[in-house]
Image: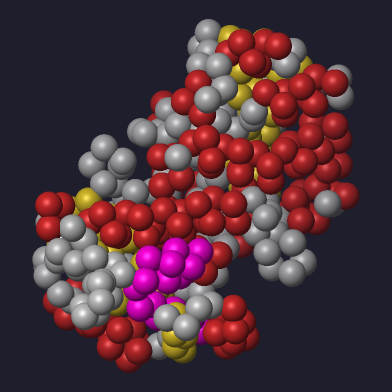
Amino acid sequence: MIVGVPKEIKPDENRVALVPAGATALVAAGHEVCVERDAGLRSGFPDEMYVAAGAQVLETADEVWDRAELVVKVKEPIEAEYDRMRVDQVVFTYFHFAADERLTRRTLESGCVAIAYETVQLPTGELPLLTPMSEVAGRMAIQQAARNLERITGGYGILLGGVPGVLPAEVVILGGGVVGANAATIAAGFGAHVTVLDVNLPRLRYLAEVMPANVDTLYSNRHSILEQIARADVVIGAVLVPGGKAPKLVRHDDLRRMKDGSVIVDVAVDQGGCVESARPTTHNDPTYTVHGVIHYCVANMPGAVPRTSTLALTNATFPYILNLANRGWTVACDEDPDLARGVNIAGGRVTYEAVAQAFDLEYTPLQALSA
């Protein structure tokens, strides 16, 4: 199979979907790998390393897309890439369809097979290809919150951990999953007082057992959310609905309850955001202010630390890439139900129910396509 690795062109996206070691393994398995020039450079992998691994470096994205039977990416295709997708081509990347109707409809029109990293799911409910980037984003969220609390960036002017005689910052985390747990760990390490809200009681019990003493857990409902954001210096949006839109837990008018100069970091913005006032921003222009509250809503946070992020991501994705190349997508998905859950669009049909529901589209179970 011909595996193509285009350079990421979403603004400020510096990751790459395949490292040279992965190219070496694919070539050894009898596959052809074509990489767009400088695709790995910003992650610390120059073209020479891919050539040494047996890959072919092509000059343009069009060449890569035209040749590849399996395209591996990091972020969802953007406008310039829509026409490059074609019938029966497999595209394996983060899609987050439920937050982008135009992307969904253009992918349907292309006839490609869209396999989304974020909905590959184990029987335990774990999302193995989302987890590494959620870990990065959760940890980064606290770094960004700390910076934006500084007065020089327009913040309240407080230190997360305080100092002796001065209380630490109040950090409220909406969601106790991978993002929330990582954010809580880092915020607690800074010395902040942290409250994690979730509706999953077993998860709250687990967090209460493993987190340090300056982390509290609280059952999430409308009353508790309003109470906590009113006292918060930092709110981290860390809610996930696999493959679907994030629920709006903080409404626009709720911001009036928050302190001027407080900070919201909505990590869920790539799935619509769990804060109603959230809209995607970029690393070059990461923040805006609504009702005195600073919003940091960068949709590809891990792209700012591409060396760490690329290695963490490809450690998780490569076994699936190799399986897709070795077996083809239909056989690979027949044999691996975890991977099959990642198929969101195939044959011009939506095969992931949450995506169909998001835009009132017809849902076709994947099994029905092969029946």
Q: Furthest residue to the bottom?
A: 223
Image vertical order of residue 255 relative to residue 213, above or below: above
Is 184 covered by the magenta stretch?
Answer: yes
Image quarter of residue 227: bottom left
Q: Which residues are magenta?
A: 182-199
* Residue drawn 15% across the image and 75% down it: 259
Left or right side of 261 for 37: right
| Residue in view at x 50 percent, y 64 percent | 182
The reply, left or right, for residue 174 in relation to residue 209 is left
Count the marks: how many?
0
- Can residue 146 be seen here? yes
Residue 117 picture location, percent across and down: 62, 48
Location of residue 256 by image quarter:
bottom left
- Taking depth in this image into account, of 353 and 164 the one nearest to the observer is 164
**Viewer-side residue, 19 vs 124:** 19
Quarter that holds the N terminus: top right
Compared to residue 175, the image places residue 119 above or below, namely: above
Could one spot residue 69 in this view of the protein? Answer: no
Residue placed at 12% from the left, 52% from the top?
Answer: 152
Nearest the camera: 97 or 129?
129
Question: For residue 197, what is the image quadrant?
Answer: bottom left
Q: How far across and how far down the image is residue 333, in percent?
A: 80, 47
Please provide percent x and percent y for residue 136.
Answer: 50, 52
Q: Residue shown at 35%/33% (left/top)? A: 11
Q: Is residue 35 magenta?
A: no
Relative to 326, 208 lies left or right = left
- Residue 107: image location, x then y, percent: 54, 39
Q: Residue furthest top?
A: 59
- Please say which color scheme the image uses: secondary structure
